[in-house]
Amino acid sequence: MAEEIVERHDRESRPSPIDVHVGSRIRLRRTLLGMSQERLGDALGLTFQQVQKYERGMNRVGASRLFDISRVLDVPISYFFDDMPEGMSESPVSGPRGRTYGLSEQQETFNPGIDSQLTKRETLELVRTYYRIIDPAMRKRIFDLMKSLAPPDTPFEES
């Protein structure tokens, strides 16, 4: 009985994988725009600490707040759910007394490091700098150069 209570408390105190994903998408877009947590917080009437908690998935973003964030970051709400790891959207919903609802037979574990390369500061600065190149032909040549320097079977290469 006591072990069950401790296990339930641990489960409830961990952020939801979906909240972590939504938070990482907020951080990605904010960083791509070159916006600080403080500036986003000011636009939303929040402290930068609250923005930080949203970005880490520690606090769940409510529907109206997500709507406001999407407007400030100039993206559709669906953006925050793009690129969710396989199986996450099919997870059953936990109900009272631990009962689960949903159609998924087997659960896949969530790997928060899945898109860690995409959210590194170096990657974000590279993308931001790339899009500041005004001449489309020059931007394309730089893109082609980067592709030619990478090993041919990298997972992010266009097919």
Image (cartoon, rainbow, N blue to C red):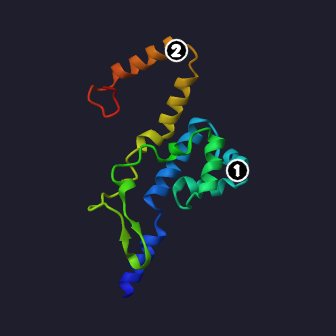
In what element is the residue under mark 1? Answer: helix
Residue that numbered label 1 is attached to:
44
Say whether disc 1 or disc 2 marks the residue closer to the N-terminus.
1
Q: Neighbour class for label 2 at 10 Å: few (<14), some, many (≥20)? A: few
Q: Residue at x 70, y 50 (%)?
A: 44
> Farthest residue in the top direction?
137
Q: Nearer the viewer, residue 22 or 78?
A: 78
Tell me where residue 102 sits by quadrant. Answer: bottom left
- Residue 122, given in percent of the width and then of the height, sits at 49, 35
The C terminus lies in quadrant: top left
Tell me where residue 76 sits by quadrant. Answer: top right
Q: Say which amino acid is labelled 2.
A: Pro
Q: Nearer the viewer, residue 60 or 156?
A: 60
Q: Nearer the viewer, residue 15 or 113?
A: 15
In what element is the residue under mark 2? Answer: helix
**Is residue 24 toward the left or the right of residue 74 in the image?**
left
Tell me where residue 105 sits by quadrant. Answer: bottom left
Q: Relative to 68, say whether 104 is above or below.
A: below
- Residue 152, given in percent of the width and then of the height, sits at 27, 25
> Farthest residue in the bottom direction?
1
Of the numbered discs in the image, which one, if any, rests on residue 93?
none
- Residue 149, given in percent of the width and then of the height, sits at 34, 21
Q: Say which amino acid is labelled 1.
A: Leu
Of the numbered discs in the image, which one, if any, rests on residue 136?
2
Q: Relative to 23, say whether 105 is above or below.
A: below
Q: Residue at x 47, y 47 (%)?
A: 81
Q: Relative to 143, say whether 95 is above or below.
A: below
The N terminus lies in quadrant: bottom left
Q: Residue at x 52, y 55 (%)?
A: 56
**Is residue 20 toward the left or the right of residue 102 in the image?**
right
Disc 1/disc 2 C-alpha distance (Å): 34 Å
